[in-house]
Image (cartoon, rainbow, N blue to C red):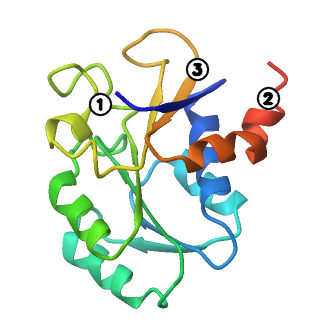
Amino acid sequence: AMDHAMVFSTGYQANLGIISTIAGKGDYIILDIDSHASIWDGCAMGNAEVVPFKHNDIEAMEKRLRRVPEGAGKLVVLEGVYSMLGDIAPLKEMVAVAKKYGAMVLVDEAHSMGFIGENGCGVVEQAGVPDDVDLVIGTFSKSVGTVGGICVSNHPKLEITRLVCPPDVFPAT
């Protein structure tokens, strides 16, 4: 169970809002090149430097992290199950590498929520890394069969994000 949650009108809005708000000017987003459009749009909406790496390539991810300037904020964005390809990220290894470099980790579980893990919490649960993942994004439009998106976290930053995240503050829904 996570301490904090934010509910959005869609999973797309959750990625858009969280990514563009969490990583700001001078920060770096390191993400899988095959990330969902909502992740790319969240990166485009923010002011962080965006650094993609080859799909599911742990070594390539580490190489990008190694190049980030000392002291810069780092956010690694991964998906549990990649929507375009249907394959699963090697989360256990990737999260370990991200933490080695002091990066925050966001995992989009939109395509694994309800299907993977003992309690249906996704690849984060299956890989046994919930304590090392800072932000988990989910959607209600797949396995739950309704509308909406969610971001859950144990990170206290999520409470601050609630106050400055445009898709949360101005949804008009």
On the rendered structure, is 16 left or right of 11? right
Q: What amino acid does circle 2 point to? A: Pro
Q: Which mark is residue 112?
A: 1
Looking at the picture, does residue 68 appear above or below residue 130? below
Front residue (pair 130, 16)? 130
Residue corresponding to mark 2: 171
**Residue 100: percent from left, percent from top:** 26, 73
Front residue of 134/118: it is 134
What is the secondary structure assignment of the residue under circle 3?
A: loop
Could you say which disc has been placed on residue 148 in the image?
A: 3
N-terminal of the pair, mark 3 or mark 2, is 3
Quadrant location, the N terminus: top left
Give the CA distance from mark 1 to mark 2.
Answer: 26 Å
Position above or below: 49 against 12: below
Given contact means CB atoms under 8 Å apart, are the residues at marks 3 and 2 in contact? no
SS assignment at label 2:
loop
**Residue 115 falls left or right of residue 49:** left
What amino acid is found at the position of numbered circle 1 in the picture? Ser
Quadrant of the rendered image containing residue 26: bottom right
**Which one is in front, 39 or 131?**
131
Quadrant of the rendering where the C terminus is positioned: top right
**Tag 1 or tag 3, which sits nearer the N-term?**
1
Q: Which numbered disc, 1 or 2, marks the residue that appears first in the sequence?
A: 1
Q: Is residue 49 left or right of residue 35?
A: right
Residue located at (40% from left, 90% from top): 67
Q: Residue at x 21, y 46 (%)?
A: 129
Q: Residues within 10 Å of mark 3 (few under 14, many from 20)?
A: some
Q: Report the side of 95 relative to 140 (left or right).
A: left
Residue at 53% in and 30% down:
5
Query: What numbered label is drawn on residue 56?
Result: none
Rendering coords of residue 139 (x, y %): 48, 26
